[in-house]
Image (spheres, rainbow, N blue to C red):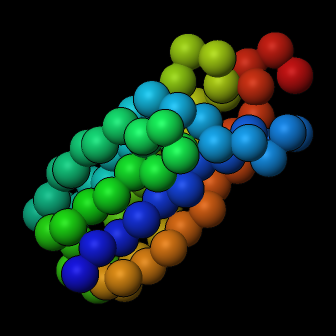
Amino acid sequence: MTVKIYVKDKTTKTPVRFVSVRIESMNLSEADDTDGDGIAEFDTIVDGKYNIKIRHADYRPYTEKMFISRNSVITIKLQRAWD
């Protein structure tokens, strides 16, 4: 069961590569960097509420709390830091 997080530029809708994506809960903290297609994958996530934190030097920091279930596909759009 894999959770996929797609990270895209809010304006251009293009994938954002090499972004740090962290998923955290009370019992879990996992991190992955997006690949060339803007995708980060997490294999050990079980259904529950998580904080998603995304960081990249060219973009505003992103944090959101959401319910994530196994096999979720989540798209997140980042805003450039200077916009």
Compared to residue 68, the image places residue 62 above or below, namely above
Q: Name the residue at the front extreme.
A: 36
Residue drawn at (47%, 59%), measured in percent from left and top? 5
Compared to residue 60, the image places residue 54 above or below, namely below
For the C terminus, which image quadrant? top right
Residue drawn at (63%, 55%), measured in percent from left and top? 76
Residue 30 drawn at (x, y percent): 21, 50
Figure quadrant of residue 58: top right
In this rendering, position of residue 49 left or right of residue 42: right
Compared to residue 56, the image places residue 12 above or below, namely below
The answer to whether residue 63 shows anywhere in this view is: no
For the N terminus, which image quadrant? bottom left
In this rendering, position of residue 32 left or right of residue 76: left
In this rendering, position of residue 76 left or right of residue 29: right
Residue 32 drawn at (x, y percent): 29, 43
Residue 7 drawn at (x, y percent): 58, 48
In this rendering, position of residue 83 left or right of residue 45: right
Residue drawn at (66%, 25%), measured in percent from left and top? 59
Q: How many marks?
A: 0
Figure quadrant of residue 34: top left
The answer to whether residue 44 shows anywhere in this view is: yes
Residue 17 drawn at (x, y percent): 52, 33
Residue drawn at (35%, 70%), measured in percent from left and top? 3
- Which is more toward the observer, 32 or 64? 32
